């Protein structure tokens, strides 16, 4: 007797497709940044990268709201992240300045892209880790790919705001590429904003800050993006401190139970 075959749904609700659509838009935006770089439209290339980061941030949240999460969507999101934030910014920087260093410049570009792939692979394998404490969802291990792309493109954004040949020098850009690549594969805990809950008495101040940020983006976009990058880097010591504090508290809570279990076994 043949085992019963699972019938495939003939129709898929459109709301379950919206997260994947957003992911594809993010992918197209990341690839379009390379097209703008080939045309030497550097500001549009940066705008396309940040647009990809915005849509990438939306797809997961929309999927949870619409209950449209799926394994297919997770795999698509991971591949999109690698292309949009691991390949696209590296190619843009190579066309902008790193190609003047020839093979050595290309080697540094490859290091960044490889570290991005390794970081995403580690993230995917850690999703099913059963022993993670509940508070660990508020932290990433290393700098996530979208944030890394925003940080590594900082020299180009800096050149829009200030003049100076050193900003476009391959040595200066290489420092960013290698530093951000190391942070991506590092064990440094960084804040993950998607799971953080906001108290009711802090909603209004937070909305005010978001409004000020939106107004700043409209009036002084490059300075605002640079300031955001500085704030993000500055938050790392606090994320490390908070992570270690929670880790110590978890160890102290588990310690007595472990001792109690051991004593119980000895008594038997």
Image (cartoon, grey):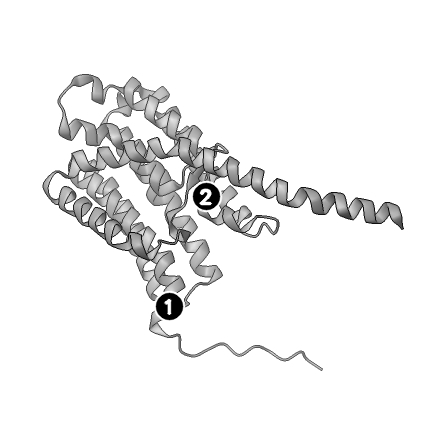
Residue under label 2, please give it. 139
**Residue 65 horizontal side relative to residue 224, left or right:** right
Give the CA distance from mark 2 to mark 1.
Answer: 24 Å
| Residue 238 sits above or below residue 73 on the image | above
Q: Residue at x 19, y 37 (%)?
A: 224
Mark nearer the N terminus (2 vs 1): 1
Residue that appears at 25% across and 44% down = 50
Name the residue carrying label 1.
66
* In the foreground, 31 or 133: 133
Q: In screen coordinates, is 138 left or right of 38?
A: right
Element on which disc 2 rests:
strand
The one of 127 and 18 positioned closer to us in this rendering: 127
The N terminus - image quarter: bottom right
User: Are there few (<14), some (14-19), or many (20+) residues within 10 Å of tag 2?
Assistant: many
Near-viewer residue (138 or 82):
138
Residue, far left: 219
> In x, y percent, where is residue 103?
36, 21
């Amino acid at each position: 007797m043949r085992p019963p075959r699972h019938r495939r749904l003939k129709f898929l609700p459109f709301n379950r497709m919206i997260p994947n659509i957003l992911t594809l838009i993010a992918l197209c935006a990341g690839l379009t940044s390379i097209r703008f770089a080939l045309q030497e439209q550097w500001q549009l290339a940066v705008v396309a990268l940040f647009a990809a980061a915005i849509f990438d941030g939306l797809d997961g949240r929309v999927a949870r709201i619409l209950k449209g999460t799926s394994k297919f969507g997770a795999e698509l999101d991971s591949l999109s992240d690698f292309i949009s934030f691991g390949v696209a910014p590296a190619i843009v920087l190579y066309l902008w300045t790193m190609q003047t260093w020839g093979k050595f410049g290309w080697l540094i570009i490859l290091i960044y892209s490889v570290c991005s792939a390794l970081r995403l692979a580690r993230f995917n394998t850690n999703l099913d880790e059963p022993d993670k404490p509940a508070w660990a969802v508020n932290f990433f291990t290393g700098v996530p790919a979208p944030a890394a792309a925003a940080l590594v493109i900082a020299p180009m954004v800096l050149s829009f705001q200030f003049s100076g040949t050193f900003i476009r020098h391959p040595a200066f850009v290489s420092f960013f590429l290698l530093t951000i690549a190391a942070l991506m594969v590092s064990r440094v805990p960084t804040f993950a904003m998607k799971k953080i809950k906001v108290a009711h008495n802090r909603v209004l101040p937070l909305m005010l800050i978001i409004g000020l940020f939106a107004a700043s983006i409209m009036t002084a976009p490059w300075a605002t993006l640079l300031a955001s990058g500085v704030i993000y880097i500055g938050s790392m010591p606090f994320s490390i401190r908070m992570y270690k504090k929670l880790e110590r508290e978890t160890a102290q809570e588990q310690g007595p139970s472990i001792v109690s279990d051991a004593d119980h076994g000895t008594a038997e």
